[in-house]
């Protein structure tokens, strides 16, 4: 499988990273180089093999469904590039 | 006064306990060396005032008889660990100005034990790299340079390895007594090997990941970078803990790792995987590995040939799994909650411009790969396939550990290379991690031990891989290996005032 400029543009859009038109071609070449190298995995027979879901054999811990933390809005907002009235701000999304 | 920066962590601990010197003196000497060592670019931020204040408190702890193995020890902290109110940016532009309002569990454990923070160390951006050339803050220079045939030092700068390049440069240059690192596919072990240090990646789940800036969550583990195996054992005990804030942290007692260093490995079974003999591997690496085998044999260990058949697939598997997780983890950098924001056309335009300006080329490359392999129609062929092969890789190890206690391999396929040598070829760069990635995929503990020098007098390391949660056996073997190798080389100072 290889990617073309159109696919790269789509990936970049999904990843929400602006890519200039003239960057598509070199990016496609780079990604194809890596994907081509990864392709060797297809020679491994994985029939009946379960995909790994946890790297160590432990059951996920349970805890009571209770609020144990919180109440520091201002600390959370302290690192925001912009905030107003105790909220994060974003560009206008509704006309 | 004697040069306290040349001590090991264990020696410094003992000297502090005996009252030979104070943490204040020990810390001040490291601060002086840190300031003279700025040409290494190992620190992004120096926190001298905090260090001297912490040293003062550590001296009080020691006087009150409450000292631990880490009390009063000046260490460097990788920029990937969130440290309260102190720059924590994973060496990325996109986290510009981020000063967390909380402390990572690993660093909180270290401060609780009285360790002293000298500053935050440089690294590959978001830990994505094997040479520390992808940092927004510029590359780190290895304190080591190759020695030319006439015996003089090369004028070229060498890479320290990555991603924990600043941490290893700081310790190898004696700017810090030890440092924290993080390892996703080899980011502690490979740089340790490139700088003549010990680098320990514990079992996945041994250290809490809470407050560590995430790269690939199923692989990321914190660990110590130190001058000796004993130092690694001491620091590991402080860093490890169960933490209910990380659901993958494992609730097991943290042993006294230093007690495991008995020096006795008689009867220990050491596996030598045949698949780690790679085509084109430099003869000197092969030779060092053979020497390592002989040393362990001489110490009474039993050498057993083993097979890890899926080894060659580990690296391409890693380059599906890690970018997939990274593309998901790094979605949080959106110009809203913290760090950089670049305005654009509407919300989507702001996201795209922020991320285009904030991420470096290697990070973007991995986000694109990750996004692609997770996208509709490709998930099964890439991601699911990789997770199945990951199972096979883990099974290879499980089978081997029916016969052996630890596995001995080289750490990296080459010594440190010159700056810029591999930065234009991603796959050549990825191959640096060929021997470290398999243990990462299987979640196993592994340690790099300095074992010799290359033909041009650059450090080389050997790796020991242990059973899950059996860091003790691995450390015992590593301690014996270290003593047998008798590695004592130090870099010749070319930087700063000297």
Image: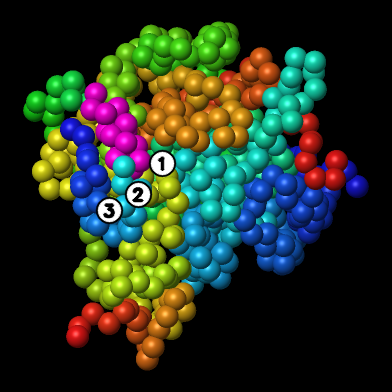
Front-lying residue, B258 or B73:
B73
Say yes or no: labels 1 and 3 on the same chain.
Answer: no
Q: Name the residue under label 2.
A: A22
Q: Mark 3 points at which residue?
A: A12
Q: Is residue B112 above or below residue A89?
A: above
Residue at disc 3, secondary structure: helix
Distance of label 3 from label 2 (alpha carbons): 13 Å
Chief secondary structure of the magenta portion: helix
Front-lying residue, B458 or B221:
B458
Q: Is residue B116 above or below residue B283?
A: below
Q: What stretch is highlighted in magenta?
A: A26-40
Q: Where is residue B406 in the image (x, y as percent from the top left)?
A: 43, 22
Asked whether the viewer can see residue B309, the reply is yes
Residue at disc 1, secondary structure: loop
The residue drawn where x is 35% and y is 71% is: B344
Q: Which chain carries label 2?
A: A
How crowded pointer 1 is (Cα within 10 Å; few <14, some 14-19, many 20+) is rated as many
Which mark is in front, 3 or 2? 2
The residue drawn where x is 73% and y is 47% is: B39
The residue drawn where x is 43% and y is 47% is: B361
Asked whether residue A39 is drawn in magenta, I would say yes
């Amino acid at each position: 499988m290889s990617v073309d400029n159109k696919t790269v543009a789509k990936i970049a859009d999904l990843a929400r990273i602006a890519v200039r038109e003239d960057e598509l071609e070199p990016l496609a070449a780079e990604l194809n180089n890596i994907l081509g190298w990864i392709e060797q995995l297809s020679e491994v027979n994985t029939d009946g093999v379960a995909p790994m879901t946890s790297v160590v054999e432990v059951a996920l811990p349970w805890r009571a469904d209770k609020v144990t933390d919180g109440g520091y809005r201002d600390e959370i907002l302290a690192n925001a590039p912009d905030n107003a009235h105790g909220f994060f701000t974003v560009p206008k999304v509704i006309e | 006064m004697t040069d306290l920066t040349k001590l090991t962590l264990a020696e410094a601990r003992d000297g502090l306990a005996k009252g030979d010197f104070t943490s204040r003196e020990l810390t001040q000497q490291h601060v002086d060396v840190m300031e003279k060592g700025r040409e290494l670019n190992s620190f992004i931020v120096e926190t001298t005032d905090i260090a001297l204040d912490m040293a003062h408190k550590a001296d009080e702890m020691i006087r009150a008889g409450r000292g631990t193995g880490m009390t009063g020890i000046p260490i460097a902290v990788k920029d990937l660990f969130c440290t309260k109110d102190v720059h924590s940016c994973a060496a990325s532009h996109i986290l510009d100005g981020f000063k967390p309002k909380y402390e990572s569990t690993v660093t909180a454990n270290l401060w609780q034990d009285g360790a002293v923070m000298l500053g935050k160390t440089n690294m590959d951006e978001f830990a994505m790299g094997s040479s520390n050339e992808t940092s927004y803050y510029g590359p780190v220079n290895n304190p080591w340079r190759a020695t030319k045939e006439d015996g003089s030092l090369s004028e070229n700068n060498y890479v320290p390895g990555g991603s924990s390049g600043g941490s290893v440069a700081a310790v190898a240059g004696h700017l810090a007594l030890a440092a924290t690192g993080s390892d996703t596919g080899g980011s502690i072990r490979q740089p340790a090997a490139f700088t003549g240090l010990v680098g320990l990646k514990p079992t996945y789940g041994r250290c809490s990941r809470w407050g560590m800036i995430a790269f690939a969550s199923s692989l990321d583990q914190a660990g110590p970078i130190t001058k000796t195996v004993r130092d690694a054992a001491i620091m590991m005990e402080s860093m490890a803990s169960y933490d209910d804030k990380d659901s993958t942290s494992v609730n097991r007692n943290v042993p006294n790792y230093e007690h495991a260093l008995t020096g006795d490995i008689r009867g220990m079974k050491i596996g030598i995987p045949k698949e780690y003999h790679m085509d084109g591997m430099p003869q000197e690496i092969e030779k060092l590995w053979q020497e390592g085998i002989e040393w362990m044999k001489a110490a009474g260990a039993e050498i057993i040939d083993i097979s890890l058949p899926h080894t060659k697939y580990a690296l391409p598997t890693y380059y599906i799994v890690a970018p997939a997780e990274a593309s998901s983890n790094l979605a949080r950098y959106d110009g809203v909650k913290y760090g950089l924001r670049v305005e654009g056309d509407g919300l989507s335009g702001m996201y795209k411009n922020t991320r285009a300006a904030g991420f470096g080329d290697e990070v973007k490359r991995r986000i694109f790969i990750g996004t692609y392999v997770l996208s509709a129609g490709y998930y099964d062929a890439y991601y699911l396939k990789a997770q199945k092969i990951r199972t096979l890789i883990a099974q290879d190890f499980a089978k081997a550990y029916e016969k052996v206690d630890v596995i001995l391999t080289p750490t990296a396929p080459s010594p440190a290379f010159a700056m810029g040598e591999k930065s234009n070829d991603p796959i050549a760069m990825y191959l640096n991690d060929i021997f470290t990635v398999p243990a990462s995929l299987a979640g196993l503990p592994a340690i790099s031990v300095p074992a010799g020098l290359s033909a041009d007098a650059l450090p080389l390391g050997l790796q020991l891989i242990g059973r899950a949660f059996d860091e003790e056996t691995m450390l015992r073997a590593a301690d014996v290996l270290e003593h047998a190798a008798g590695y004592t080389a130090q870099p010749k100072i070319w930087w700063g005032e000297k």
